[in-house]
């Protein structure tokens, strides 16, 4: 069956979701689509029955083909042959990033290397990357998941999509690339960097959708303005963003600068790459591809499952992967899940936008702080450019936090009184959110380093033995 005969287009319901969406839907022809409607709208009971069947198979598959899981199950006295219901997953041991490092490079693979068609890897702080592999079936499943998610976000076969992720061992670029091609869209594999050329291609090729990190999308918007290109000369209508966090305030900045409708998608290399979940045009949570990924939310204090709607750490079990099945992987992302059917018609569970990570939390003078809290304050202030750095230091036995923010307008530097008033305003807003005083430093426009990939927000200047968090994903 050709894709054109397979998808279903729904028009008329998305326009009321939000002003930005209404603008794009009416002015630029946005459509809400299903790539695989039968799966995406499957009744909850049928979906859970399918998940249970797959969970039984993948647990046995892991036990029989991956030494790590055989040892974990035996040590936990967990019998994979006796799974009766989905809740039995509570007795299954967790998988962590340390397991990948300890089994570098291929010891977590469940198939021989002759069946591995592709290898990807993500960077790590230990000098050794996290290595992931894919069989042909894995690659087909991956592109299906991505096609579903980009269609849900509003992409169509009529789109020209510019992928500004770095190509290479990083999973993001090729994950979106093959999913968009399966959808039927035209793909521009422009990779990252050389932003002026990116803008030139965007203008000349008539790019309608952008794939990038949120921070790089902001940079592209900045360069469009610097090049003096009129908004009407850029045909962007849709942003498919991922690979780093994006607060609602940052998303509003991106939409304002690039005149597009911004959506988030979620994934990580250990699970498959992008393709685990993503927003539809309703933007009320990221839909999981639940026939392939079984999500849980756990309370990190006691590792028990949270109730629906409660916030905790996201844990994912892959249900379909052949080369690298992963059971109960602790993502460190803090979010919540709802199982309520979405207005878009999809019945899959939805995860809220992550509010932070358990491993990027800063503990300053006994107070837990997440970078996303600070970003929300900064992005809401028009006097401040959407670029910042968090510098953590230590004086004696006390940690301290400096928030470096970039001025949006250099003319502010002409008035000391205006600078001090702005600094005081930022301090007040941060203290209201964080509950503690922070040092605020105002820096000149274009001072903070721009990046074509993930933005580095945190600079930890404490002695190594004093650092209590990691910013690695």
Image (cartoon, rainbow, N blue to C red):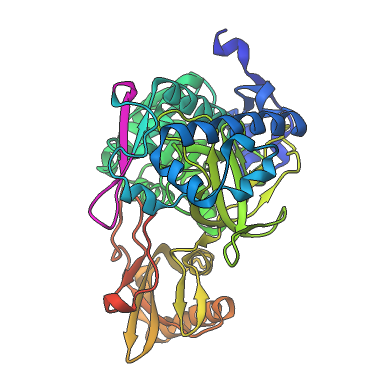
Residue drawn 36% across the image and 79% down it: 441
In the picture, residue 433 is in which quadrant? bottom right
- The verdict on residue 295 being magenta is no
Magenta residues, as a range? Answer: 114-131
* Residue 423 picture location, percent across and down: 44, 81
Q: Is residue 221 left or right of residue 381?
A: left
* Residue 349 visible within the image: yes
Identified at 61% across, 10% down, the residue is 5
Q: Is residue 132 above or below residue 468?
A: above
Quadrant location of the N terminus?
top right
Residue farthest to the left, as pictured: 127
The quarter of the image holding the C terminus is bottom left
Instruction: Pinpoint residue 361: horizontal percent, then vertical percent.
Output: 46, 68
Residue 77 x/y as whole percent: 55, 49
Please, which residue is most extreme toward the bottom here?
396
Q: 441 or 23: which is nearer to us?
A: 441
What residue appears at the point 44 percent right and 28 percent down from the top-left corner?
322
Does the rendering let one see residue 289?
Answer: no
In the image, 152: left or right of 459? right
């Amino acid at each position: 069956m050709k894709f054109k005969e397979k998808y279903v287009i729904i028009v008329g319901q998305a326009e009321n979701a939000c002003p930005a969406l209404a603008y794009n839907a009416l002015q630029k022809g946005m459509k809400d689509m299903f790539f695989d409607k039968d799966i995406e709208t499957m009744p909850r009971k049928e979906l859970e029955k399918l998940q249970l069947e797959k969970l039984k198979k993948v647990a046995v598959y892991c036990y029989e083909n991956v030494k790590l899981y055989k040892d974990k199950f035996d040590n936990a006295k967990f019998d994979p042959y006796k799974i009766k219901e989905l809740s039995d997953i509570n007795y299954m041991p967790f998988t962590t990033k340390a397991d990948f490092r300890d089994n570098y490079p291929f010891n977590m693979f469940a198939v021989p290397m002759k069946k591995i068609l592709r290898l990807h890897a993500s960077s790590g702080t230990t000098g050794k990357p996290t290595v992931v592999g894919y069989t042909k079936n894995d690659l087909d499943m991956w592109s299906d998941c991505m096609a579903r998610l980009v269609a849900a976000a509003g992409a169509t076969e009529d789109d020209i999509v510019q992928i500004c992720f770095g190509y290479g061992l990083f999973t993001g670029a090729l994950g979106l690339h093959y999913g968009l091609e399966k959808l039927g869209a035209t793909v521009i594999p422009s990779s990252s960097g050389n932003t002026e050329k990116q803008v030139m291609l965007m203008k000349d090729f008539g790019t309608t959708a952008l794939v990038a990190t949120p921070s790089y999308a902001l940079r592209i918007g900045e360069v469009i303005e610097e090049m003096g290109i009129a908004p009407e000369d850029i045909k962007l209508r849709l942003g498919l963003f991922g690979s780093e966090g994006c607060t609602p305030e940052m998303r509003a900045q991106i939409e304002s600068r690039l005149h597009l409708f911004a959506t988030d998608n979620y994934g990580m290399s250990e699970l498959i790459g992008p393709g685990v979940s993503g927003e539809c045009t309703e933007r009320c949570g990221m839909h999981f591809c639940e026939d392939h990924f079984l999500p849980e939310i756990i309370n990190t204090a006691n590792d028990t499952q949270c109730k629906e709607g409660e916030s905790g750490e996201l844990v994912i079990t892959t249900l379909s992967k052949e080369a690298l099945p992963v059971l109960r992987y602790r993502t460190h992302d803090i979010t919540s899940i709802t199982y309520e059917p979405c207005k878009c018609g999809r019945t899959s569970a939805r995860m809220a936008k992550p509010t932070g990570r358990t491993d990027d939390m800063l503990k300053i003078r006994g107070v837990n702080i997440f970078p996303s809290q600070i970003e929300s304050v900064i992005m809401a202030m028009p006097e401040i450019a959407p670029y910042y750095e968090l510098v953590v230091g230590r004086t004696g036995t006390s940690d301290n936090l400096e928030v470096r923010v970039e001025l949006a307008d250099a003319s502010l530097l002409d008035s000391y009184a205006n600078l001090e008033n702005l600094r005081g305003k930022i301090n007040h807003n941060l203290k209201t959110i964080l509950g503690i005083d922070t040092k605020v430093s105002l820096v000149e426009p274009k001072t903070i380093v721009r990046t074509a990939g993930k933005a580095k927000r945190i600079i930890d200047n404490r002695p190594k033995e004093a650092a209590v968090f990691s910013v690695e994903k």
